Amino acid sequence: MEFFKYTKTFNFMGKSKLAMILSIVLVLGSYVILATKGLNYGVDFAGGTVIQVKYDKTAPIDDMREKLKSNELFNGSSITEFGAPDEVVIRMKSTTASVTVDIGDVTREALKGTGNYEIRRVDIVGPKVGNELREKGVMSLILATIGILIYVAFRFEWRFAVASIFALVHDVSIALGAIAIVGLDVNLDVLAALLTILGYSLNDTIIVFDRIREGVTNNRNSDLAESINESVTRTLARTTLTSLTTFFVVFTLFIFGGEIIHAFAFTLLVGVVVGTYSSIFVASPILMWFGFSVKDYHAKLAKKAQREAEKERMRAQFESGVM
Amino acid sequence: MKLNFRIVIFALAIVFGVAFSIPSLLQTEGGKKVNLGLDLQGGLHMLLGVKTEEATTSRLKSIAASIKFFTDKNDILIDELKFDESAISFLLLDTDDTKHIKEHLSSIEGLNVIYAAENISMSFTPEEIVKTKKQAIDQAIETIRNRLDQFGLTEPVVAKQGEEKILVQLAGIKTAAEEQRARELISRAAKLELMAVDEDRAARVSVMNDAEAASFGDVILPDAKNEMNRYLVKEIPVLDGSMLTNANVGFDQNNRPVINFTLNAEGAAIFGDFTGRSVGKRLAIVLDGKVYSAPNINERIGGGSGQISGDYTVMEAKDLAIALRSGALLAPVYMMEKRSVGPSLGADSIEASMIALIGGFILVIIFMVAYYKLAGLIANIALIANLFIILAVMSLFGATLTLPGMAGIVLTVGMAVDANVIISERIRELIYEGKSIHKAIEEGYQNAMRAILDANITTLIAAVVLYAYGTGAIKGFAITISIGILASMLTAILGTHGIYELLEKKIQKSKNNRLWFGIKG
């Protein structure tokens, strides 16, 4: 089976303006949503309490609300269905600092008489820990980006690094926008998914860049757009295949993984699609617009080869005892 | 067919993978197994903070008690011995004793003592306060660990996190009652104090307030059983639990559980001295600020043992004895973060992620064979080997598998085929260019290598950052991704290359590129 023939080169760069407009609309749209609707921080980052309760029949949500009203600890709490009608989560901003009696115990007591239930999960995150987790989360995104930037600049050229960072920011922004639209709780697992997108999208971009590097090095033709078109075409089958297999896996995780991994799988799902798109349509044009010149690159390579040759000659001279 | 080093290494890796994943897969008795995280097997995760500032206060209190004992014993007359959160002060009635007092106080480390004629006051030096706070955390970790070790759970985790937080992880907590018991055992201050009842004013306790009691150097404490029943006791205790050597559950004449405790030599001496001087008065046995009993002292009590009676169940008495034995918490702990997962939720999570893992895996395998034919099959062999190796490495290191970790493995399945896709595409390309099978394979691997390496290293960078900055479950995700990437280099690059080398002659002879690589020609 073959998706793409190697004989035909697609003109991706010809479509780059159109793609750019789409990307800009998506990214700006995401920022608008993030600014207006905002992200829904879950307990991990905002602090608070989440209690997951499972009943042996449909959960009596109205009855539960009524029961919880009696205690002011539950002021402003929300009760929502969680994945199935017999399972609910109670979310609230308040936390308890006491070790011996916590809000989970209080809830257990308060829900007495609402039917047969089991408290399956209690997460209490104090405000201080929430702040710390958020700081660490942002820190890890920034550090990962810097680490990757340095590596790519070292292995390729600075413009490649800049272009891949643009693609990363593009992907993460759109994923965040999608999270905001759906209104998912942003917890540690979503952060993990964002970091995975970072790695995944970069993976894709680098495979394409590697081809461009190879094409530019071997090709006497100094037209970058043509080189890019050829390289992207040649990696197209791979990009599509890998994206498809990853998509399959993440999709099964999304469908069958259960409610608790839902946010993680959703974020990845968006990331896989956007990451594939960006490595083809976003990263490469940026490379071109930053003025990557094939001629200069050739000159640089030639210089490097010359230096190597010089070194080699010196070494040979040294070994033969001339110096 | 000729063996090559790649296929040998690959075969060894498979043997390693299968051998070391057997204990985890079949749940055998012996052997190293993968630990299931708390989110998968159910359990309690807590992050505790320590109220370190209370540690200095409590140390000052015991210094005050020792001053009291020292002056009583040496017949030095002092008055107005007082202490608050930061300082102790007293009046020395006979300044001739200054030298004697000075000698005693200078033997206590970290004190800054000011002598102003008969007024003597002291507080901790700043360094001592820092030291005390640090000690309070270390001691809390040690104490909580001791208590949990006696609680009967397998491998409780108690560790310092950051500068002043304590991480407690208890796997295998099944019920809410068990959790409650564990939490009570952990947070119990278990501060035992033996305090003298102020018999001169005890009759007026019902009309006295705290401020008035303080003016006499007394404090009002409630009865453990009946809060309305109050005792007026001397604020500075006769002695405290730090001199306790043992505590055990026993039974009194009515067959109710009590706790018998023994004091060390110093404690026994103080206790004997005090009871000798205080015949006819009462001694309050105070635990965590509540009076459990206040028996009359009938005679001097030597030997240094005593009894705490209260309205306990046997279980409560046992836990209390554990807490007393493992020592008091110098400073109270409070909850910063708690995550408890019931075992049924953990089982559900395992089931859901297994379905996703197997489902995704089968889809990928079918797809690869459909697209690449035998080349796809070779990639699939590498993929399966990869899964075994991940499991084997995790078992060997006793790593913890969390729910995000499971997701990490699922993701690795998706990404591990990537290397083989890249390689297969390269080989197809080279065959199209008319290269021989041998050349196509060798050059295909060479060309693909650089891209795969660069791509994998950048993903590893992200995973390492995730590990360094992640907490708990997220760390599990970073670990599986990292192991998965490294394993895929071994299986997908080295392993499949070895298989191709092994089969190269066959491929050449068959001239069937459709069968081998899924392309025409």
Image: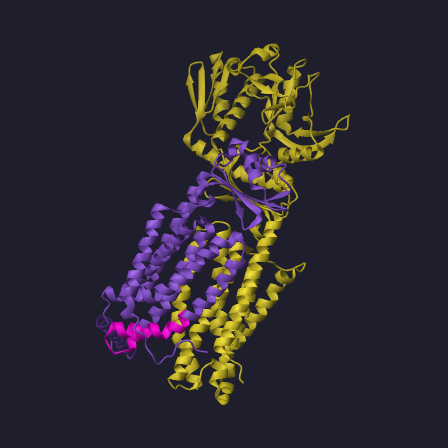
Chain colours: A purple, B yellow
A199 above or below B310?
below
Residue A70, quarter of the rendered image: top right
Query: In the picture shown, does residue B199 fall above or below A244?
Result: above
Quarter of the view holding residue B268? top right
Q: Is residue A279 left or right of residue A186?
A: left
Q: Quick one: B246 or B155, which is closer to the camera?
A: B155
Residue plotted at (52% across, 22% down) = B64
Number of numbered discs present? 0
B442 lies left or right of B224: left
Specify the quadrant that holds the C terminus of chain B.
bottom left
Give the side of residue B152 with respect to residue B82, left or right: right
Is A238 magenta? The answer is yes
Front-most of residues A120 and B337: A120
User: Where's residue B324, x and y in %?
Assistant: 63, 33
Residue visible at 55% across and 65% down?
B359
Q: Residue at x 41, y 72 (%)?
A: A238
Please tell me which residue lies in front, B376 or B500: B376
- Residue A2 locus on image (x, y percent): 43, 78
Query: Where is the N terminus of chain B found, in terms of image quarters?
Result: bottom right
**The quadrant where residue A60 appears:** top right
Q: Indicate the position of residue B273 as horizontal and vertical percent values.
A: 64, 19
| Residue farthest to the front, as pictured | A62
Q: Residue furthest bottom?
A: B509
**Does residue A244 appear in this view?**
yes
Q: Is residue A264 magenta?
A: no
**On the rendered structure, is B240 left or right of B52?**
right
Question: Can residue B497 be seen from the camera position used here?
Answer: no
Q: Is residue B132 above or below residue A40?
A: above
In x, y percent, where is residue A148? 36, 60
Examine the residues drawn in magenta and state their main secondary structure.
helix
Residues in magenta, as a range: A213-239
| Residue A54 vertical position relative to residue B268 in the rendered view, above or below | below
